[in-house]
Image (tube, grey):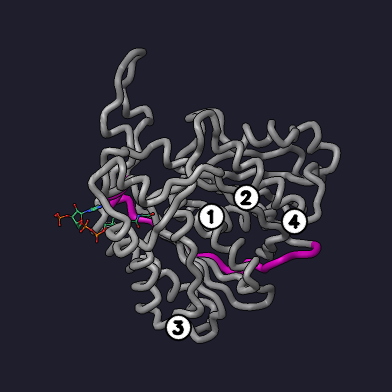
Amino acid sequence: MNSTCYIAGLGTSVPEKKLSNFDFEKIMDTSNEWIVSRTGIKTRHVLAEGQNISDIAYEASLKAIVDAKIDKSEITHILVATCSPQKLSPSLACILAQNLGLSSTSGLQTISTHNPSLVCFDFNAACSGFIYGLEIARAFLALHSNSTILLVTAEGLSRRLNFQDRTTSILFGDGAGAVILRNHGDYLYKVHDVSLGSDGDYCDLIQIGGGTEFEAKVGDVVDESFFLTMQGREVFKSAVRGMAQESLKLLEKNSLTVNDIDLFITHQANLRIIEAVGERLSISQDKVFTNLEKYGNTSASSILLAMEEAREQGKLKKGAKTLLTAFGSGLTWGSALLS
Ligand code: UT7
C-alpha cells in the first residue's frame, strides 16, 4: 500500500485579541514572574466577542490553499482536529466546507470516480490532534490516491477556561492551523512516518465539560464542570514520559538516532516540559523550537503555529529531518517524522 504523504501547503491564524500575564494579574492572585518561570508563557491570543474558531480556521485554510498553489475545488477531504468545537454538531469541517464554498457537487466535477464526494468530519485527539490527523490523512491517501486533504487544527479553549482557576486559565490560548496533504505534485515536506498512542485509564486528568454528560435544561446556570479542569502535576510527568518514549520509538522504527534529527518541535504546553523532553532525548537545545511564550498552549494547533514560525525563520527546511511530538487529554500522544 502506498503511504506517501506530502505537506503541500501550510497556513496559520490566531485571533488579534491578546491577553498578557499582566492582564491576569489584574483578575486573579498570580504574577507575571510565576507564569513565566513555571510555564514560559508571556501572552496568548483569544477569540474576541462574536468571533468563532471557524473564522480563524477559515483564514488558516485559505493561507494553506494559496501556499499549496491549488484550487480549493481540488479538496476532497476536510479533517478538523479540535477539542473545543464550535458546536457539538454540525462538525467544524462541514461549517468550513460551507464557508469555503465547497460542496459535494463542486467536488464531483474534479474528483475521480473512486472518490466522488467531499468528506468532512471533526475528530478529537486533544493536543495530539495534528499528529493524529497526519496518520488519518495517510490512511485516506493510501485508500484514495488522488485525494487532496485539508487538515485543519482549530481551538478556542478560551471559551472553556474557568477564569477563577489560576492553575489552568493562564496556560491556554486560541489558534488555528491548516495543511494541504497529497501524495503527488510539488511539496514543502514529506511525512515519513507517524506513531500514535493513547491510554483511557488517565481520562480524568484533563477534562472539558459541556457535552451530553451536562444534563441541562433551558435557564440552567453552568458550574465548574463546564470548563477545563486539569491535574497539572500528573499531566506534566505523563507528558514528558509520553513524548520522549514515542519519539524514541519512532526513531528506532526508522533506524534513526536523535543525532540524525535537525529540528525538534514538540507540543507547546510548558517550556519546562519541552526542556525535560529534550533532556530525556539528549537533543541539543538549539535544535528545539519553541514559540509558546507568544501563544500559550493552543492544544491541537500548537505544532502548526510552531512549524509556520520555524519555516519563517528558515529553521524548518525541506529535506531536513524534523521530529514532531505531542501529548494531550485522553490521554493521547504521538510523534511524526518529516523531511
Ligand atoms: O496540553 C496538554 C496538557 N497540559 C499540560 O501539559 C500542562 C501540564 N502541567 C503544567 O504545565 C504544570 O503542572 C502547571 C503549569 C499547570 C503548574 O505548575 P507546577 O510547577 O506543577 O505547579 P503546582 O501545580 O505544583 O503548584 C505550585 C504552587 C501551588 O501553590 P501551593 O499549593 O504550593 O501553595 C499552586 O496553587 O503554585 C500555585 N499556583 C500558582 N501561583 C500563582 C498554581 N497556579 C498559579 C498561578 N499563579 N497561576
Amino acid type of the residue tagged 4 in the rendering: Asp
Please name the residue shown 65% across and 64% down the image: 3
User: For numbered disc 2, what is the local secondary structure?
Assistant: strand
Q: Is residue 144 visible?
A: yes
Mark 1 = which residue? 130
Going from the N terminus, do you reach mark 2 or mark 4 first? 4
Measure the C-alpha gap from mark 4 to mark 1.
18 Å
Mark 4 = which residue? 67
| Chain part drawn in magenta | 185-206
State left or right for residue 46 relative to residue 317: left
Going from the N terminus, do you reach mark 4 or mark 3 first? 4
State left or right for residue 135 relative to residue 23: right
Measure the C-alpha gap from mark 4 to mark 3.
31 Å
Answer whether labels 1 and 2 touch (C-beta < 8 Å): yes
Mark 2 = which residue? 151
Mark 3 = which residue? 284
Measure the C-alpha gap from mark 3 to mark 1.
24 Å
Q: Is residue 197 shown in magenta?
A: yes
Amino acid type of the residue tagged 3 in the rendering: Ser
> What quarter of the picture does the N terminus occupy?
bottom right
